Image (spheres, grey):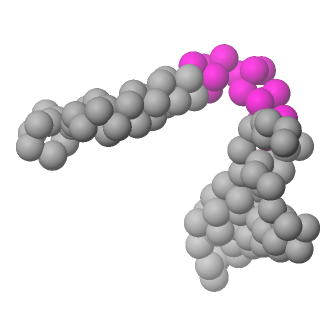
Amino acid sequence: MTALRGLVRRRSHPVRVALLTLGWCLLVLGILGGLLPVIQGWPFGVAGAAILYVESRSVQRMVRRWRQKHPRVERAWAKLRAWKRASKRARRAGAAPPGEAEDGGPSGT
C-alpha cells in the first residue's frame, strides 16, 4: 500500500466525482451569490472551496503556490497549523487546549 500525500484519501471513483462536482457547484453558486442580491454567496463559496481543497491535489497546489507568493498569509497559516497541532496534543494528553482556561471556558474572561 502506498503512502497517501496531502489531504486526499482513497475514495471510490463515483464518490470522488460527486464530491468534486459538489465542490465546483457550491463555488460557482457562491460567486453568483456574491453578484446577486437575492442570496448570500459566501457560505456556499467557502463550503465549495473547502471541499475542493480537501479533495483536489491541483487545488492544494494552487493554494500552496499562492501562500508562497504571500509571506504574511504563509506565516498566519503556519501559526494556525502549530496551534492546531498543539491543541490536538493537549487533547490527547488530557490537558486543556492552548488558549482555554482550566474550567473549559475561553481564557481572558
**Eyeballing the image, is 57 above or below 72?**
below
Between 25 and 82, the residue placed more toward the observer is 82
Residue 103 counted in the magenta span: no
Residue 1 point in image, percent of width and height: 84, 42
- Residue beneath the point at 88% across and 74% down: 14
Q: Quadrant of residue 36?
A: bottom right
- Residue beneath the point at 63% across and 82% down: 38
Residue 47 point in image, percent of width and height: 64, 63
**What are the residue bounds of the magenta stretch?**
60-75
**Eyeballing the image, is 1 above or below 65?**
below
Tell which residue pokes out farthest to the front in this image: 1
Tell which residue pokes out farthest to the bottom in this image: 38
Name the main secondary structure of what is drawn in magenta: helix
Q: Quadrant of residue 2?
A: top right
One can see residue 105 in this view: yes
Residue 68 point in image, percent of width and height: 75, 21
One can see residue 24 in this view: no
